[in-house]
Image (spheres, rainbow, N blue to C red):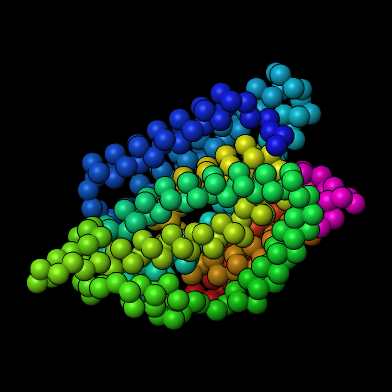
């Protein structure tokens, strides 16, 4: 598979991700169970976004030096477009996480453990899916049309169900866990299992962790084909995905109290998926310039955010 990533670039990025996760785990362990403040979440969010810009700046500089300005500009825009798409889709993911935490009455101080474990699982899962996807697209080019049609259908479904909140009680994963595992009604701190009268029970936090993992698998099925419409380079696809995911925990606590203000974002994301799916379907006939794709994607997302804030202000 063709990629601009050399062996040392892959290795350096893997080392960076491992270090980032270790730092996150160390910070979580040092702080203990506590409610993440808005200021803390904002600082971490700024850090992760800044690291993403540093990465793409270094990548642009390297490619500009070794492969020319045109390649550097194209790859940098591909990364930024992919990062924007993945970051935006992760916001929709966050709203589902919020509903899961609320349904199980998980205190804010215990939510971060479930999120960081979910993030680690998401990175591993997406790395596997992205490498498989890159291989499949290289071997079977016609899968681009399948991915494109899938994204259009997903976008239409997202538009139709934008105002509908999922019923957690009817979730098939939750029903399966209740049928096959003994689940306690009470939390036991941040423990995933507890002992009640000598019998082992799984805590609600364990159930939340499983549901977050399954939710991310479902979102990955949507988001990974979306970024392959932007670039088929597995290095760019993976790095854009991972940078978007690494900031997910901070972004969750940043937006948790503002979820209702972004009620129109789902419509913007639905249009983005339809646009990207269409881009995929026509790629062999007309290649939409990556700069145009970036502007359209950013415009749809920004427009839905501004519309959400405007209507929220009028209603309050």
Left/right placement of residue 290 relative to residue 127 reads: right
Q: Residue 118 in the image: state x and y as whole percent.
A: 41, 54
Q: In this view, does 308 lie above or below 136?
A: below
Give the magenta-colored segment's residue range: 281-294
Indicate the quadrant containing the N terminus: top left, top right, bottom left or bottom right. top right
Kindly tell me whether residue 279 is visible in this rendering. Answer: no
Closer to us: 257 or 80: 80
Q: Residue 316 in the image: state x and y as whole percent.
A: 49, 74
Q: Which residue is drawn at 46% across and 31% down?
A: 16
Q: Which residue is drawn at 43% across and 72% down?
A: 173
Kindly tell me whether residue 180 is visible in this rendering. Answer: yes
Q: Residue 275 in the image: state x and y as whole percent.
A: 75, 59
Q: Which residue is drawn at 61% across and 60% down?
A: 222
- Identify the image quadrant of residue 235: top right
In the picture as drawn, the residue positioned furthest to the right comes out as 285
Closer to us: 234 or 99: 234
Left/right placement of residue 81 relative to residue 118 reads: right
Based on the picture, tell me whether residue 95 belongs to the magenta stretch: no
- Identify the image quadrant of residue 291: top right
């Amino acid at each position: 598979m063709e990629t601009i990533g050399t062996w040392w670039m892959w290795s350096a990025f893997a080392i960076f991700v491992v270090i980032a996760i270790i730092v996150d785990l160390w910070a979580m362990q040092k702080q203990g169970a506590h409610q993440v403040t808005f200021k803390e979440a904002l600082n971490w969010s700024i850090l992760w976004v800044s690291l993403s810009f540093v990465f793409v700046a270094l990548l642009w500089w390297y490619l500009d030096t070794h492969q020319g300005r045109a390649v550097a500009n194209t790859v940098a825009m591909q990364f930024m477009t992919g990062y924007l798409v993945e970051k935006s889709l992760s916001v929709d993911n966050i709203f589902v996480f919020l509903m899961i935490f609320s349904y199980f009455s998980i205190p804010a101080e215990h939510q971060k453990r479930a999120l960081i474990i979910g993030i680690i699982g998401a990175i591993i899962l997406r790395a596997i899916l992205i490498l498989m996807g890159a291989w499949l697209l290289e071997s079977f080019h016609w899968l681009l049309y399948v991915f494109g049609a899938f994204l259009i259908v997903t976008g239409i479904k997202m538009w139709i169900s934008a105002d509908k909140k999922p019923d957690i009680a009817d979730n098939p994963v939750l029903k399966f866990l209740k049928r096959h595992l003994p689940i306690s009604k009470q939390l036991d701190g941040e423990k995933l299992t507890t002992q009640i009268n000598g019998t082992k029970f799984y805590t609600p936090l364990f159930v939340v962790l499983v549901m977050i993992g399954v939710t991310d698998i479902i979102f990955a099925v949507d988001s990974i084909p979306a970024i392959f419409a932007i670039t088929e380079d597995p290095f760019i696809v993976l790095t854009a995905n991972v940078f978007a995911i690494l900031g997910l925990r901070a972004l969750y606590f940043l937006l948790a109290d503002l979820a209702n203000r972004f009620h129109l974002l789902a419509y913007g994301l639905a249009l983005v998926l339809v646009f990207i799916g269409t881009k995929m379907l026509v790629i062999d006939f007309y290649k939409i310039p990556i700069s145009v794709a970036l502007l359209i994607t950013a415009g749809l997302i920004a427009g839905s955010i501004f519309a959400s804030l405007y209507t929220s202000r009028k209603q309050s």
